[in-house]
Image: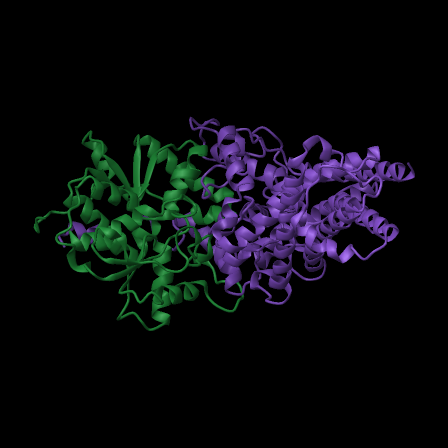
Chain colours: A green, B purple
Amino acid sequence: MSETINFQVPTMAELMARGEEPEVLFWVGCAGSFDDRYKKVTIAFTKILNKLGIRFAVLGTEESCTGDPARRAGNEFLFQMLAIQNIEVLNGYNIKKIVTACPHCFNTLKNDYPALGGNYEVLHHSQFLQQLINEGKIKLQGGGEFKGKRITYHDSCYLGRANDVYEAPREVLQALDAELVEMKRSRRHGLCCGAGGGQMFKEAEPGNKEVNIERIEEALNTNPNIVAVACPFCMTMLADGIKNKEKETEVKVYDLAELIDKSL
Amino acid sequence: MIEQIIFIICLASVGYIAYKRIRRIIQNIRLGKDEVIKDNPSQRWQNTLLIAFGQKKMFDRPLVGLMHFVIYVGFLIINIEVLEIIIDGIAGTHRLFAPILGGFYTFLINFFEFLAVGVIVVCAIFLIRRNILRVKRLHARELTKWPLTDANLILTFEILLMLAFLTWNASDTVLRERGVEHYNIAGIGSFWFSGILSSLFEGWNTTTLIVYERFAWWFHILGILGFGIYVTYSKHLHIAMAFPNTYFARLLPKGEMRNMPVVTKEVRLMLGLPETTNGSSDTSVSPESADATPGRFGAKDINDLSWKNLMDAYSCTECGRCTSECPANITGKLLSPRKIMMDTRDRMEEVGQQIESGKEAFTDGKSLLDNYITREELLACTTCNACVEVCPVSISPLDIILELRRYMIMEESSAPGSWNAMFSNEENNMAPWKFSPSDRFNWADQLKSGQ
């Protein structure tokens, strides 16, 4: 691919002003917008979209939290306030197709919004990337820098069990020509990172271990070079786990989009 | 003749007790809120066939799945024999089906005996796993006292019932071979398993043999009838509830949460939007319709839950697959999805007893939340759906947890401080963290500046 791409991040407002419609709306999400680590994933995914010439747009400052943490914590009022306002914005722009790098946003947009009047085709970026690979639009150069690396993939609950998306992320990783190793608990039986259901925003209840430590121990048992994730919360939890085990120089945590972007 | 009369009285009494008990269970389930579950019957039948009849999820753990399958098939098939026993008991006949079925009868009894031996072996292994090997998921805070006794009683009782069946056949065979009147039925071949046991009885005199034969016959049939009633008070009720419960289990993606139309109405009003949406209002999963009186937000007690949540509780056999996959429980937190189901059932039984004794329900000052399930348990859930995914009979502990959380937050505003901070960020900054909404698009600056 050309190195002198002038990266564009068009907003819906700009597109509308030009009378254009995007192929797909990239829903960035709060972590993708504000979390320093996950912003890198947002940028990686945006670069992929640019490199492949996909006509996309973002909402920019018109985007709000989908309301997932509020809803799962039990605050239905707050959830619906956010959701209904988002749906007003999305329907106002006549959005039909959405892609997002956050499984929580993905689940909420896809499953929770229809009952409130928001009906869209919603894809997680792993599904979107898988489609691009299958269509031959993403061609990795000789496997790229991850060829032969040991990668273990951590299933996020809101992608896996919540929506039965188990294979798309794995197929994306297989395109890297890496050595994919599975943890003992994977797919349907994958162990949560510990952050879902509002746990990201509170201390864990008393116990004898943190969930992310339990999970990272299992991941490290596979002797990976890379722990691949597809969720901002999982990324935080597993990266923290690796720091706790003082393995951050040997083992890296990457999102699927970063791995693909680096190989393009 | 007296024997027949006693048998008919026993049968009628058991029928009456069972009828009353089943009616109580149905009424208890109906304490829950209405929820219309009628969509996609073909998918529902398919799930019932695969997951309930086919025990698909039991085979997630193949060896235990197989052993459980032996008991399941044994239970289903050996009970065909109960039909003959009941008719014999009423009519005073002996092995009524033998002359009718001829050689096939011998085959059938042999097959039943084969299964009976299988059931005995598996029940013995299960007792060893539970009490000697002490498999971890079968030992927990919620599995002491009655639940522990219940489990051991069921296994012991099943062994005794099968032993009665086998020794009944054995003693009967000796009587038949001696040509004793009433037992002297032509055309019955030899039984392989009870044939081995027959040698035990060969030295007995005929009178003693008849006494034992009658004892084993009565023990077997009264045992089955008594067990039938016991089951309705026990976790073992899953043998019946697994089927309807799987049929009525939700078909939606597990990530979807039950909508609250009452809230939608209020929020739309607050935002100055027209009341109706152009979206698909999926009322099949909404326990309350938008124009109904709201009642409580979320659930404090069993009558705030859907009837399906309550049916779930009666379907739970406390196997603990949910708890063994729960990230909170694995890391030593108080939450156990199995306990959520046991608590729901215990509370239902408590309220049911109040109704039975003529008291007004729900006036005892107790509730599912706090008296049974603590806030610490609810707050430990990561909503990861592992418990829902593995349940062999399609129970959702998560649904109950989330409804109880809704009550805590919306009715009592009793969230932990850090959640309140997250709520206020969401309200003011449209993000769970304290960032300015105007900075939301700053991530793109770096990219647009050509890096």
Report the quarter where the C terminus of chain B lies.
bottom left
At x 54% / y 63%, what residue is drawn? B333
Q: How many labels does the image show?
A: 0
A169 sits to left or right of A261: right
Measured as percent of width and height from the top left, residue B124 is found at 64, 59
B93 sits to left or right of A238: right
Residues A172 and B392: in front is: B392
Residue A223 lies, with reference to residue A78, above or below; the image says below
Residue farthest front in this picture: B178
At x 34% / y 48%, what residue is drawn? A102
Residue B88 lies, with reference to residue A44, above or below; the image says above
Residues B149 and B198: in front is: B198
Measured as percent of width and height from the top left, residue B261 is found at 53, 34
Q: Is residue B367 visible?
A: no
Q: Is residue B167 visible?
A: yes
Residue A21 lies, with reference to residue A181, above or below; the image says above
Residues B301 and B36: in front is: B36
Measured as percent of width and height from the top left, residue B65 is found at 53, 51
Measured as percent of width and height from the top left, residue B419 is found at 49, 55
B142 sits to left or right of A263: right
Residues A244 and A184: in front is: A184
Residue farthest bottom in this picture: A246
At x 29% / y 45%, what residue is drawn? A125
Report the quarter where the N terminus of chain B lies.
top right
